[in-house]
């Protein structure tokens, strides 16, 4: 990690002077916000209140600490499953603490751009971020495992690996470099394969395609000939409508309908093999978290678990009806061909191995992750798959 990254500076020499100036202004705005003591003021302890104990033992001392934190999300409020999970976290903390632990929740762009959440934590702008770790794989490639990798773990497998399979401990070693703690922050479920202007029948149809797709999935698509682009959710529809891009992926029917992609293109593919079980992350300033009273730390961990579970429950409840509405509107729902998926999987496994060969940190995560995937797939291939094949027939 470079000195620029340690200091929260993500500018690059190749950027234009105008972009550098914009970033500098953004940092100054952040520092001004902190000096004003606004929502990002962090911890503030009230003076202890003394009073008579009534038993002759002298004054009883009660300390009531109040905490005011700022949370920035990478996702706009229109995407209520994601943004709503951050709001639920804040609401539960306020309720459990009787108003003593307050977190203000902000959309991307209010104080922090959508892909600079980790930087904002490092420079002290916010104390909490809700984002996807693979957005920051330019800092450390292995952060992709905290979210998902192509042909990786399905939602329950991803959560089992993080919570019970040693995944969080491995990811924590990476985040320690940034002074950040990471908490699993909600899963979308298996995603759709995205929206395409023209039908895609083979890998040959991907050549030269301009597609918005982030993370490791973008790396694989690039290896298959796609011209990969990245942009926040709020910019995708206009880019499709104006033919700046030919295809995009996002999440699934519930969010995709809200973003209006079906108004620009009609071919909707499945499955999203690059994101079979993506987990978002609540990132927390480690020093601020460890300075909290133990009761507040426990509240945060309980609230995070509820917020994470809430997110996937919303998607599982809302996606079926949203998909029906899209089909009724004329959307063509199509499966990726088996040949395309096989080629994509081969490219993925080759890329995983090459990344591990070049990066000891990557290798340290990949080996146990692959072992967990092998064991977990063997189990899910039994009772789970047998039931799914019977219960969810295509006819």
Image (spheres, rainbow, N blue to C red):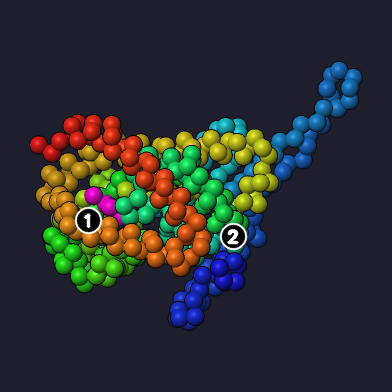
Mark 2 vs mark 1: in front: 1
Residue at horizontal 53 percent and vertical 35 percent from the top: 302
Q: Is residue 304 left or right of residue 332?
A: right
Q: Earlier in the sequence, mark 2 or mark 1?
A: 2
Nearest to the observer: residue 134 or residue 302: 134
Q: Which residue is mark 1?
A: 341
Nearest to the observer: residue 260 or residue 311: 311
Confirm whether residue 89 shows in the render: no
**293 is higher (above) or lower (below) than 179:** above
Q: Which of the 4 quarters of the picture holds residue 386? A: top left
Q: Quadrant of the N terminus?
A: bottom right
**Residue 278 in the image: x percent, y percent?**
37, 49
Residue at horizontal 60 percent and vertical 36 percent from the top: 298
**Residue 323 in the image: x percent, y percent?**
20, 43
Q: Magenta span has 246?
A: no
Residue at horizontal 46 percent and vertical 76 percent from the top: 19
Q: Quadrant of the C terminus?
A: top left
Nearest to the observer: residue 67 or residue 355: 355
Confirm whether residue 97 shows in the render: yes
Nearest to the observer: residue 330 or residue 272: 272
Crowding at label 1, few (<14), some or many (≥20) Cα neighbours within 10 Å?
some
Residue 206's disc is: none
Q: Magenta span has 273?
A: yes
**236 is higher (above) or lower (below) than 99:** below
SS for dot 2: helix
Residue 177's disc is: 2
Residue at horizontal 50 percent and vertical 44 percent from the top: 166
SS for dot 1: helix
Cα separation, mark 2 vs mark 1, equals 36 Å
Which secondary structure is most common in the magenta stretch? loop
**48 is higher (above) or lower (below) than 196:** above
Report the magenta residues as a range: 271-275
């Amino acid at each position: 990690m470079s000195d620029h990254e340690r200091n929260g500076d993500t500018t690059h020499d190749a950027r234009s002077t105008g972009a550098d100036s914009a970033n500098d202004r953004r940092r100054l705005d952040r520092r001004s916000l902190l000096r004003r003591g606004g929502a990002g003021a962090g911890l503030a302890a009230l003076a202890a209140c003394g009073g008579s104990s009534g038993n002759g033992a002298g004054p009883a001392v009660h300390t009531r600490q109040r905490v005011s934190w700022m949370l920035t999300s990478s996702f706009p409020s229109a995407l209520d499953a994601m943004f709503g999970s951050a709001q639920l976290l804040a609401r539960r903390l306020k309720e459990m603490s009787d108003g003593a632990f307050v977190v203000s929740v902000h959309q991307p762009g209010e104080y922090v751009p959508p892909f600079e959440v980790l930087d904002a934590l490092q420079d002290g702008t916010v104390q909490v971020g809700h984002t996807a770790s693979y957005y920051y794989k330019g800092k450390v490639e292995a952060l992709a495992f905290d979210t998902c990798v192509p042909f990786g773990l399905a939602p329950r497998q991803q959560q089992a690996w993080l919570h019970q399979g040693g995944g969080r401990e491995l990811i924590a070693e990476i985040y320690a470099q940034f002074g950040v703690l990471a908490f699993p922050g909600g899963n979308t479920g298996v995603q759709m394969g995205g929206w395409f202007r023209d039908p895609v029948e083979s890998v040959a149809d991907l050549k030269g395609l301009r597609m918005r797709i982030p993370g490791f999935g973008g790396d694989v698509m690039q290896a298959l000939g796609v011209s990969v682009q990245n942009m926040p959710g709020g910019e995708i529809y206009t880019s499709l409508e104006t033919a700046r891009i030919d295809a995009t992926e996002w999440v699934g029917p519930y969010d995709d309908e809200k973003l209006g992609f079906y108004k620009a293109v009609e071919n909707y593919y499945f499955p999203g093999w690059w994101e079979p079980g993506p987990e978002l992350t609540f990132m927390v300033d480690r020093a601020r978290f460890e300075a909290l009273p133990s009761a507040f730390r426990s509240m945060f961990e309980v609230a995070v678990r509820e917020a994470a579970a809430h997110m996937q429950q919303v998607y599982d409840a809302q996606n079926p009806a949203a998909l029906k509405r899209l089909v009724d509107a004329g959307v063509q729902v199509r499966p990726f061909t088996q040949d395309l998926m096989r080629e994509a999987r081969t490219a993925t496994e080759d890329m995983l191995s090459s990344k591990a060969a070049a990066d000891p940190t990557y290798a340290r995560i990949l080996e146990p992750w692959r072992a967990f995937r092998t064991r977990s797939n063997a189990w899910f291939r039994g009772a789970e798959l047998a039931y799914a094949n019977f219960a969810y027939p295509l006819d």
